[in-house]
Image (spheres, rainbow, N blue to C red):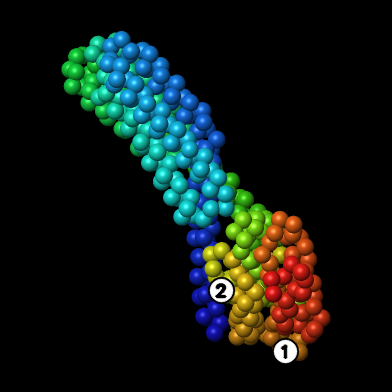
Amino acid sequence: MATKHNFSGSQLSEANTDEKDVQIQHQILTESLTFFNRAMPSVALGHVVAGSVIVVALHDVVPALNLYAWLGALICVSFVRLGATMLAARRLMDAPVKKVQNWSNILTACNLAQTCIWGASVFLIWPGDIAHRAVLVTALAGIIAAGGTMLVLHRHSFAIYCLPIAIPAVIQLALSGTRLEIILAVLLVSYSGLLIISVNRLSNVFLDGLRIRFLMQAESRTDALTALANRRGFDESLRSIWQQSIRAQQPMGLLIIDVDRFKTYNDYYGHPQGDIALKKVGELLLEVASRSTDMCARIGGEEFAVIMPATNLEGSRQVAEDFQEALTNARIPHRKCDRGFLSVSIGLNVITPEKSSTPDLFMLETDKALYEAKESGRNKICVARSKTSDE
């Protein structure tokens, strides 16, 4: 039995590490999209202004229908891109990993659409003389450079943004065949290549910095002994899940768990053995509350908690009973208690939060249920009796 639990603990540790990596990648993606959203109004305005300047510059040498059709398409795509970015910003709050990734793909598609409009300019509004062509190519190079600044947190997006502009322009310049235009084509290739390399390196620096920052934040919310969330992480998650539950109008369950007579356990077996027992309790808790949305924490010395979003009273009670059963089956010796093995008392509470209720009151009522479980003989589960509970 011991070997089985050791193996399970190793698997849980690896799973926690993988989940932490996924969460950090999720945070990085969300942060980059949030940055992009803040800049998007000025970006959209910049594209419209740049397009308008080109129309003015080429008005005498390019058919007006081509110019205004191209500018109209550019303006439409700019506003679609702006709208999609603003909509994504509203949906990103507390969004799951898959949804954030979907929005990232949508915004990448919008970026590609806009850059294709710019790339199409070399076919739709390509001027006949070298001077005006140089103006258009200079404007395209500026658009590529501006994209490098804006998409520095989207490493792969910049290549998608750059190439649909650079490749058509280079092809048109090369086909023209004059010495000056071939030089412009070579310069544009070199410029675009250097930008892609520079943006890639700068992206690595930014993303590594974000990763370190989010990793440090995660460590500050993690209990060093059990690798569960600590009290700070628990409090932040409780507030976040509370707000999610209000928006979704779904119940949420909370367990507060106290290891029975743990002081006497430490006095008898010693603190090192007590630490081993607490780690085992944490492992068993993760095995039972195993949904990706469940949040397990060590909130005190021998006190643990589980937050269960979208979980009713029956489901919450099942988790509590399964955990007590798992701990009973583990048979961790405790000679200084009547049962002879480690046990826990559990306070249980379920609520569908409303704006008028508070997580602090919810926590207080759950703690009272835990106290009742301890007072009634320990190794029990007591449900909070209050007007906030969803019975």
Badge 1 crowding class, 10 Å Cα cut-off, few under 14, some 14 to 19, many 20 or more, is few
Residue drawn at (62%, 83%) of the image? 325
Please, what secondary structure does the residue beneath circle 2 have?
A: helix
Question: Is residue 206 visible to the viewer in this orientation of the structure?
Answer: no
Please give left or right for residue 132 compared with residue 322 in the image.
Answer: left
Please give left or right for residue 173 compared with residue 256 in the image.
Answer: left
**Quadrant of the frame with the N terminus:** bottom right
As drawn, the residue found furthest toward the right would be 375
Is there a contact, CB below 8 Å, between mark 2 and mark 1? no
For marks 2 and 1 on the same chain, the one whose residue lies earlier in the sequence: 2
Whole-percent x, y for residue 169 in the image: 27, 24
Which amino acid is tagged 2? Glu
Which residue is under mark 1? Answer: 339
Which amino acid is tagged 1? Arg
Residue drawn at (77%, 63%) of the image? 361
Instruction: Name the mark nearer the viewer: 2 or 1.
Output: 2
Q: Quadrant of residue 75?
A: top left
Badge 2 crowding class, 10 Å Cα cut-off, few under 14, some 14 to 19, many 20 or more, is some
Q: Is residue 88 above or below residue 17?
A: above
Residue drawn at (54%, 68%) of the image? 291
**Quadrant of the frame with the C terminus:** bottom right
Which residue is under mark 2? Answer: 287
Question: Is residue 109 visible to the viewer in this orientation of the structure?
Answer: yes
| Of the pair 191 and 378, the residue shown nearer to us | 378
Q: Quadrant of residue 156?
A: top left
